[in-house]
């Protein structure tokens, strides 16, 4: 028998075009690779399999050949005698000029969401109101619903190390009975080290399903939560540190914990003037487009002057600093 397209779409062998399209839409949305970024290879294979099944069964000629000869006759392979039915079958011989070439799965996906039901398989009498409305709308291309944008706030640690977020959404989807019902789904976002505020992650057509409307894209826009110690400027990290006048003149050690948990001890051996900036190379944020590379860490100093001095302290300073 080879591939069982009916089983792949979870429909029976008497399924109408309406049944096929509903089944395909539901499964294609479930297995679209953009929704499975963690195991994309598996999802791509499943999505391709579902799309090929729909492409065959939604076409009258391909379906008749598949029903008569199975995958063998459909794809030009030698046909086993056990596959042939009665001599009077309308598809008793595969057309010599027939050639089935599987199409791009994304093209099939786009068509299934933009076109109405295949008229070849629609009932010829007693149409339901839903079917009538669909046929009347077949002259107009459905409009896509406006994009839905949501903020995705991340800590600086998450943007430094990378993380995975799983977000639960609820949306209306069309079931096999043609009704729109609420359904919960989990969207997985793999945040890469170094991603910046404003980065957009798009999940195509994951908005509500409704008649004659292409579901909206859901777009998550990365936002950055404030950090107690660090701020970010592109790929660089910035720290502001207050030191006393004595430390600025006599030296000290600046201690920091990095965003990935390491301890840094940075000695100050030079005189630090107000507004001085110390640059520590390659201790900034990871650079998303250059794996292994990092920006810089910049420490900006504020020197705190004493509010008052005794006469003895002033004399000591004059003796040390004045020629």
Image (cartoon, rainbow, N blue to C red):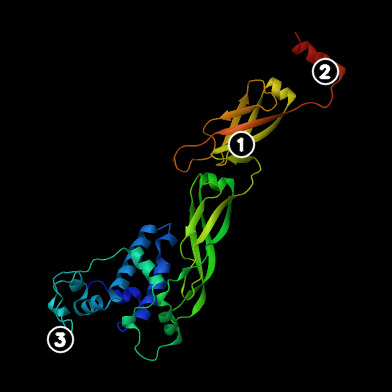
Q: Nearer the viewer, mark 1 or mark 2?
A: 1
Could you tell me if the residues under marks 2 and 3 are in contact, i.e. CB atoms within 8 Å? no
Q: Quadrant of residue 317?
A: top right
Quarter of the N terminus within the rendering? bottom left
Q: Which of marks 3 and 2 precedes in the sequence?
A: 3
Residue labelled with disc 3? 86
Residue labelled with disc 1? 238
Who is closer to the viewer here, 294 or 64?
64
Number of disc labels: 3
Who is closer to the viewer here, 165 or 279?
279
**Around disc 2, counting alpha carbons within 10 Å, would you say few (fewer than 14), some (14 to 19), or many (20 or more)?**
few
Work out how far the residue at label 1 is from the one at label 2, CA to CA, in angstroms.
Answer: 35 Å
Q: Which of marks 2 and 1 precedes in the sequence?
A: 1
> In the displayed image of the protein, which residue is found farthest to the front?
139
| Residue lying at 23% horizontally and 77% vertically, measured from the top left | 61
Q: Quadrant of residue 69?
A: bottom left
Task: Give x and y (percent) for residue 124.
Answer: 34, 88
């Amino acid at each position: 028998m080879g591939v069982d397209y009916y089983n792949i779409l979870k429909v029976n062998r008497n399924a109408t075009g309406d049944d096929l399209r509903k089944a395909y839409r539901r499964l294609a949305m479930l297995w679209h690779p953009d929704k499975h970024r963690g195991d994309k290879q598996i999802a791509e294979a499943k999505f391709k399999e579902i799309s090929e099944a729909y492409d065959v069964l939604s076409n009258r000629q391909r379906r008749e050949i598949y029903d008569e000869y199975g995958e063998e006759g459909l794809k030009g392979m030698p046909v086993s005698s056990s596959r042939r039915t009665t001599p009077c079958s309308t598809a008793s011989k595969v057309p010599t000029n027939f050639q089935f070439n599987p199409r791009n799965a994304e093209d099939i996906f786009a068509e299934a969401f933009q076109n109405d039901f295949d008229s070849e398989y629609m009932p010829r009498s007693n149409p339901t109101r839903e079917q009538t409305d669909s046929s009347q709308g077949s002259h107009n291309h459905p409009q896509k619903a406006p994009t839905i944008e949501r903020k995705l706030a991340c800590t600086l640690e998450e943007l430094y190390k990378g993380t995975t977020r799983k977000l639960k959404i609820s949306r209306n989807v069309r079931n096999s009975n043609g009704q729109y019902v609420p359904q919960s789904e989990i969207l997985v976002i793999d945040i890469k080290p170094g991603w910046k505020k404003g980065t957009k992650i798009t999940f195509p057509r994951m908005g509500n399903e409704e008649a004659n409307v292409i579901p909206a894209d859901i777009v998550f826009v990365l936002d950055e939560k404030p950090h107690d110690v660090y701020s970010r400027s592109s790929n660089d990290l910035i720290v502001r540190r207050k030191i006393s006048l004595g430390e600025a003149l006599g030296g000290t050690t600046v201690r920091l914990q990095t965003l990935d948990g390491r301890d840094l001890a940075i000695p100050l051996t030079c005189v630090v003037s107000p507004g001085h900036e110390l640059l520590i190379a390659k201790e900034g944020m990871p650079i998303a487009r250059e794996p292994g590379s990092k920006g810089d860490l910049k420490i900006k100093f504020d020197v705190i002057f004493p509010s008052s001095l005794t006469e003895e302290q002033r004399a000591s300073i004059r003796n040390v600093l004045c020629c």
